[in-house]
Image (cartoon, rainbow, N blue to C red):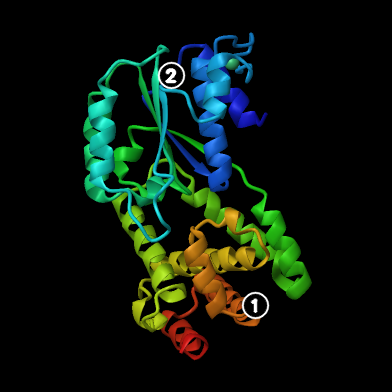
């Protein structure tokens, strides 16, 4: 069991149970596994002294086999390009106020919470504001910034660690040895920036726009002239270039068969599209340029010079 899970079990045992959790980081499978373990820790009939579930009692087995009447996993059926709409949250809302069937708690695991529409998130927020007694929500998303700040502020957030950085380092060491170390450091820095707790509205908007640009540039069939979309303010541009680098990393990971560890471009469909559009060589050269420009900007390089250099690469 991971350190994170152990810490969570301990909190639950001590009675620090929250109405809403957000699990970010890791792969979709890792997030779901941890969510189900939390459900087991809450409902287990034979918890051990440290709070960890037994994984073999009636409740634990039902959770494992997805047949526990009080543990509901929602959002698994959403296609890559689909959204987690308000209708699904309305269903949850109307059920959440009905008492549990056979245990003390009802648990809703919302996978792909990053696909929740703004309307759906606002509907969810109403439940969070006046949570029904004995109901626990566990939201799963690659990173918290895909959710509204108001939703994030009401959830207890846990960040899963992933070994994807190592996978990528190996990949890059092979293809492009001179900067694999710098790349990993840079990526770690951005990941911790994205994992911080209190985003200002400005930061939040900035990251959202950067993510949107990644989708547009790497996935959308419509031609995207990157340089026209990049912000002209130095710090903003650095942020955009770093997020773009991270998206390149996702595509490289996918090519390597490790798409589960993607961070910005999540979803088989998206990664597949991006992967077929960009060769390994192109990706490496894109990363090289994004990284170089970002570093030069940090040491007060000229924004316009960077723009003109990037224009050759992405034209
Ligand atoms: Zn059990």
Q: Is residue 91 above or below residue 227?
A: above
Which quadrant: the N terminus? top right
Residue located 61% across and 18% down the image: 52
Q: Is residue 11 visible?
A: no
- Report crowding for label 2: few under 14, some 14 to 19, many 20 or more residues within 10 A (C-alpha): some
The circle on residue 66 is none
Element under label 1? helix
Is 99 left or right of 303, judged from the image as shown? left
Q: How many marks?
A: 2
Q: Is residue 92 visible?
A: yes
Residue located 56% across and 71% down the image: 295
Q: Is residue 155 above or below residue 288?
A: above
Circles 1 and 2, Cβ within 8 Å, touching? The answer is no
Q: Measured from the top left, where is residue 105 in percent x and y?
A: 39, 16
Is 48 left or right of 123, judged from the image as shown? right
Is 247 left or right of 112, judged from the image as shown? right
Residue located 50% across and 91% down the image: 312
User: On the image, which quarter does residue 4 sit in?
Assistant: top right
- Report crowding for label 1: few under 14, some 14 to 19, many 20 or more residues within 10 A (C-alpha): some
Q: Measured from the top left, where is residue 220 in percent x and y?
A: 40, 75
Q: Is residue 311 above or below residue 130?
A: below
Seen from the viewer's position, the closer of residues 150 and 236 is 150
Q: Measured from the top left, where is residue 72 in percent x and y?
A: 41, 30
Seen from the viewer's position, the closer of residues 9 and 269 is 269
The answer as to whether callout 1 falls within 8 Å of ligand 1 is no
Element under label 2? loop
Q: State how far apart marks 1 and 2 are (Cα).
A: 46 Å
The circle on residue 280 is 1
User: On the image, which quarter does residue 250 sit in?
Assistant: bottom right
Q: Earlier in the sequence, mark 1 or mark 2?
A: 2
Give the residue pinned by disc 2. Answer: 17
Which quarter of the frame holds ligand 1?
top right
């Amino acid at each position: 069991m991971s350190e994170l899970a152990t810490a969570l079990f301990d909190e639950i045992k001590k009675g620090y149970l929250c109405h809403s959790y957000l699990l970010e980081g890791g792969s979709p499978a890792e997030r779901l596994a941890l969510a189900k373990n939390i459900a087991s820790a809450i409902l287990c009939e034979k918890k051990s002294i440290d709070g960890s579930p037994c994984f073999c009692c009636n409740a634990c087995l039902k959770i494992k086999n997805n047949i526990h009447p009080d543990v509901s996993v929602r959002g698994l059926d959403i296609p890559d390009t689909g959204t987690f709409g308000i209708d699904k949250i309305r269903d949850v809302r109307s059920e959440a106020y009905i008492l549990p069937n056979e245990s003390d708690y009802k648990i809703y695991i919302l996978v792909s919470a990053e696909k929740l529409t703004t309307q759906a998130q606002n509907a969810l927020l109403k439940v969070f504001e006046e949570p029904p007694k004995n109901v626990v929500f566990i939201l799963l998303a690659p990173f918290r910034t895909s959710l509204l700040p108001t939703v994030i502020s009401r959830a207890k957030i846990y960040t899963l660690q992933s070994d994807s950085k190592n996978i990528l380092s190996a990949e890059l060491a092979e293809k492009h040895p001179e900067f694999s170390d710098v790349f990993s450091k840079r990526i770690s820095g951005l990941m911790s920036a994205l994992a911080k707790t209190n985003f200002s509205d400005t930061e939040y908007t900035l990251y959202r726009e950067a993510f949107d640009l990644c989708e547009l540039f790497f996935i959308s069939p419509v031609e995207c002239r990157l340089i026209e979309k990049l912000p002209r303010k130095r710090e903003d541009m650095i942020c955009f270039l770093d997020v773009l680098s991270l998206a390149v990393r996702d595509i490289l990971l996918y090519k390597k068969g490790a798409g589960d560890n993607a961070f910005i471009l999540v979803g088989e469909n998206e990664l597949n599209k991006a992967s077929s559009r960009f060769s390994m060589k192109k990706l490496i050269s894109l990363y090289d340029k994004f990284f170089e420009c970002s570093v030069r900007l940090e040491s007060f390089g000229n924004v316009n010079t960077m723009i003109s250099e990037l224009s050759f690469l992405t034209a």
